[in-house]
Structures are given as structure tokens and as C-alpha cells.
């Protein structure tokens, strides 16, 4: 625990505790970098197992070898996949468990007679998955009614399984963490990113529309020094200045102020949302959310990108010989140079918004097909889509928030390119 200043639910406690204990234990036999290396190697082994399991299931589903070999090459060599498997961010483990959940749910729903143990496996994976990402539970709650409405065959077992998962996760996050483990809840500021960004944009672009009384209330709700730091693509600068005590004291007053200014400035509100989420819906957008004035220029150079957060955070230490490694240079250039984003076709493979558009197509395509298709693929893909939509309510667009799209990309390609054979395949033992 020596490497954790304060444990809260802002980041998933399950991942934080796992990270702390593995690194702390391994560091006893070396330095802190050795501890981090042990965690990363263990994560690499787990990722290889998950990808192998996915390829195995694709074989059982009778996906043609061509698409399986493409999936193997993608998992083994695509930079976004490789880089995040080597990263300790919570998004990697979460996305791996989400991939497991998608594959296991698809496999269970493709079975002619799904057994109870299969649904138990789905439930366990869903439970762990939801504890590894705070916003995942909201997408899962939205997912449940869609599942019940579109899957008559699996409605009873699936409904009971998913209902039990939701109740269990809420018990852990609202009782076990805060009351038994004394882990304080995360800040509500994350939920206010969109409205506070909109207020800040009005403050910058059309201050004349704000009355003296409204201005006084606005600077009371958000620190004025933070309002002056407004960045269209990075809501953290405004979020850090939110005074939650005033909003909690008078939530209706905050809502009234937001509505009044929004009615006077609808275009500014819309622009605020679109600019803050541009990397999530515009395929040619450069992932440069962290490339803002408050960022150290040596970390995120001017006119570069922040595709990967290419740095070693404390308590880890950056070794001086790392930049001399050719592979390190390769990933550094992808992270800090906008070149990869500008390459025709290839650049789209690095774009979360392009993969998100592909996911939307797959969901609509799955829904359009037969009931068998819908029951097998519509629900798993729909959950991933709902999960990705929650990212649009956050402070910034980063590739790691959409990492699951890169992990399920081979499944989407196989579905589009080989859907007839794919749908005919059933979950059968080798």
C-alpha cells in the first residue's frame, strides 16, 4: 500500500488493489520497475490467454480460417493492442474481461441448449468486468431491458443472471467498498463534465448573455480561475474547479442556471459537446486531448498527439536507455506524431470513431437479420455500443476509453465478412 496515496472509488478499487499488491510484493525482490514488470508480464500472459480463447471459439463457430488468421495477426502485431497490453492502466484488464464476456455470452446464446454452468460463467465474467470500470454498470443496466425484449429464448436464465450481477455489483460498490472496506466514493464531478463545459464555453464566447446575478452564481459553482482555462477538448480543467458543496446545497439552482444559459445559447452548447467528443465521432480527428497548454511541452510536444500516454508515472522510473530502443521509438512516434492519423485507410484502423461506426453497423446488421442472428450477436455487440456511449459524457476522448473496440475488431470483421458461415456455426466442443 506504500505506493498508494489515497484509495478511493474514483478508480475501480479492484484494479487498484490488484496493482498495488502485485507491484508491492514483486518489488521486494528488486526495485519498483521490477514490480511493474511482473504485473505487466502477468497481464501479457492473461491477454494472450484471452486472445487464444477468442480464436478457439471462432474456430468452434466455424469462422473460416482466413478470418481467424487475420484475427491472430491483429492480436499479435497491431500497435494499439500491443501497447495497451503492456500498460498498467485499468482499461486493459477491463477490456480483456469485456472481450471474455462478449465471447462467452455469444457462445452461450449460440448453444442449442445453454447449460446453467454456461450462464454462471457469463455472470462471473460480467461481475468482474463491472467492478473494473465505474461507468460499465450504467451501460449494463441500460443493456438489460434490451436483452429481455430481444431474446425470448434466453430471457429467463439470462434475466436472472444479469439481474443477480447488477444487484451484486451495487452491493459491492455501495456497501462493501464504503462501509466495510472504508473506501470513500469517487467524486460526482465526472458526471458534470458535459454541463460544466457548456457553461464554461458560454462564459468564454458569449459573456454578454450572462446577467450579473447569473455570473455571480456561475463563479460560485465553478472557480473562475478554472473557467479561464477552458479547453474545448479537455473538461478536466473545468472539472477541477467545480465546487460540489454548492451544487449539492442547491442542485435545482445549478440546473436552472444551466437551462437558462442553454436556451439563450443552444449552438454554443451543441458545439461544446461536439468539440469535447470530436475524437469519438469524427474518424479523421487527431487524438490530441492532452496536447493542451497546461501540459508540459516535453511530454506532449506542440502540434503532436497524445495517442498513448507515453510516459512513466511515479513511483515508476524512466530508464535512460529506453529511448535508444528501436521499438520504443516506434511506439513513441505513434503516440506523439500525428502522421499515423493522416495515412489513408491505415489511419482509420487507429481511429476509435471509425471502429465505433463499424460497431454501429454491426449492431444494426445483427438486428436486421433473423431471430437466430439477433439472439447470438445483437445483445453482446449492443452492450459494447452502450458502454462506448457512456464515454461521451466524460471529460476527454482517449483511445484507452475505447480499447474494447480494438479487442473486438476481429470479431466484427469476421461477422461482416463471413456472417453466413459464422451464424451457421454453433458452440460445439472440439
Image (cartoon, rainbow, N blue to C red):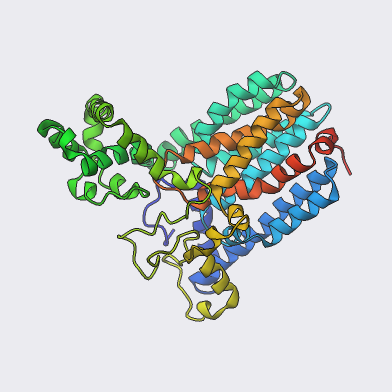
State left or right for residue 428 relative to residue 107: right
Give the quarter of the figure containing the C terminus: top right
* Image location of residue 167, percent across then percent down: 54, 27
* Image location of residue 312, percent across then percent down: 46, 67
* Image location of residue 72, percent across then percent down: 75, 56
What residue is shown at x 34% (from left), y 40% (from top)? 272
Which residue, as the protein is rendered here, is positioned at the far right?
Answer: 430
Q: Nearer the viewer, residue 299 or 291?
A: 291
Q: Nearer the viewer, residue 117 or 303?
A: 303
Which residue, as the protein is rendered here, is positioned at the far front?
Answer: 344
Whether residue 339 appears in this view of the structure is yes
Give the vertical position of 368 relative to 31 (above or below). above
The answer to which quarter of the image holds residue 247 is: top left
The answer to which quarter of the image holds residue 364 is: top right
State left or right for residue 40 relative to residue 425: left
What residue is shown at x 59% (from left), y 63% (from top)? 40
What residue is shown at x 53% (from left), y 33% (from top)? 139
The answer to which quarter of the image holds residue 38 is: bottom right
* Image location of residue 206, percent across then percent down: 21, 39
Whether residue 28 appears in this view of the structure is no
Amino acid at each position: 500500500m506504500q505506493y498508494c496515496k489515497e484509495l478511493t472509488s474514483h478508480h475501480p478499487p479492484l484494479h487498484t488493489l490488484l496493482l498495488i499488491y502485485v507491484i508491492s510484493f514483486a518489488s521486494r525482490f528488486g526495485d519498483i520497475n521490477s514490480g511493474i514488470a511482473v504485473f505487466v508480464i502477468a497481464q501479457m500472459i492473461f491477454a494472450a490467454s484471452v486472445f487464444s480463447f477468442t480464436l478457439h471459439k471462432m474456430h468452434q463457430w466455424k469462422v473460416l480460417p482466413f478470418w481467424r488468421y487475420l484475427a491472430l495477426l491483429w492480436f499479435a502485431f497491431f500497435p494499439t493492442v500491443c501497447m495497451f497490453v503492456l500498460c498498467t492502466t485499468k482499461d486493459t484488464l477491463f477490456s480483456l474481461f469485456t472481450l471474455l464476456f462478449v465471447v462467452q455470452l455469444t457462445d452461450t446464446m449460440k448453444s442449442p441448449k445453454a447449460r446453467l454452468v454456461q450462464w454462471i460463467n457469463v455472470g462471473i465474467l460480467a461481475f468482474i468486468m463491472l467492478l473494473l470500470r465505474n461507468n460499465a454498470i450504467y451501460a449494463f443496466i441500460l443493456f438489460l431491458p434490451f436483452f429481455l425484449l430481444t431474446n425470448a429464448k434466453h430471457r429467463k436464465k439470462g434475466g436472472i443472471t444479469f439481474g443477480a450481477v447488477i444487484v451484486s455489483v451495487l452491493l459491492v460498490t455501495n456497501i462493501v467498498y464504503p462501509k466495510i472496506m472504508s473506501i470513500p466514493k469517487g467524486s460526482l464531478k465526472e458526471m458534470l463534465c458535459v454541463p460544466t463545459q457548456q457553461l464554461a464555453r458560454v462564459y468564454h464566447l458569449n459573456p454578454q448573455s450572462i446577467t450579473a446575478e447569473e455570473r455571480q452564481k456561475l463563479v460560485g459553482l465553478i472557480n473562475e480561475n478554472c473557467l479561464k482555462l477552458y479547453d474545448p477538448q479537455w473538461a478536466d480543467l473545468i472539472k477541477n474547479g467545480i465546487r460540489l458543496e454548492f451544487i449539492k446545497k442547491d442542485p435545482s439552482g445549478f440546473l436552472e442556471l444551466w437551462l437558462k444559459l442553454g436556451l439563450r445559447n443552444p449552438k454554443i452548447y451543441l458545439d461544446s459537446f461536439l468539440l469535447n467528443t470530436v475524437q469519438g465521432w469524427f474518424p479523421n480527428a487527431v487524438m490530441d486531448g492532452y496536447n493542451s497548454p497546461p501540459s508540459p511541452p516535453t511530454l506532449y510536444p506542440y502540434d503532436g498527439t497524445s495517442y498513448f500516454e507515453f510516459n512513466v508515472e511515479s513511483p515508476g522510473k524512466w530508464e535512460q536507455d529506453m529511448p535508444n530502443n528501436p521499438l520504443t521509438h516506434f511506439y513513441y512516434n505513434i503516440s506523439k506524431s500525428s502522421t499515423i492519423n493522416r495515412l489513408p485507410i491505415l489511419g482509420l484502423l487507429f481511429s476509435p470513431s471509425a471502429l465505433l461506426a463499424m460497431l454501429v453497423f454491426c449492431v444494426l446488421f445483427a438486428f436486421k437479420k433473423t431471430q437466430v442472428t439477433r439472439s447470438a450477436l445483437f445483445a453482446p455487440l449492443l452492450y459494447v455500443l452502450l458502454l462506448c456511449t457512456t464515454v461521451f459524457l466524460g471529460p476527454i476522448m482517449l483511445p484507452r476509453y475505447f480499447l474494447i473496440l480494438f479487442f473486438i475488431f476481429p470479431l466484427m470483421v469476421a461477422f461482416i465478412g463471413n456472417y453466413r458461415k459464422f451464424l451457421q456455426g454453433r458452440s460445439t466442443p472440439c
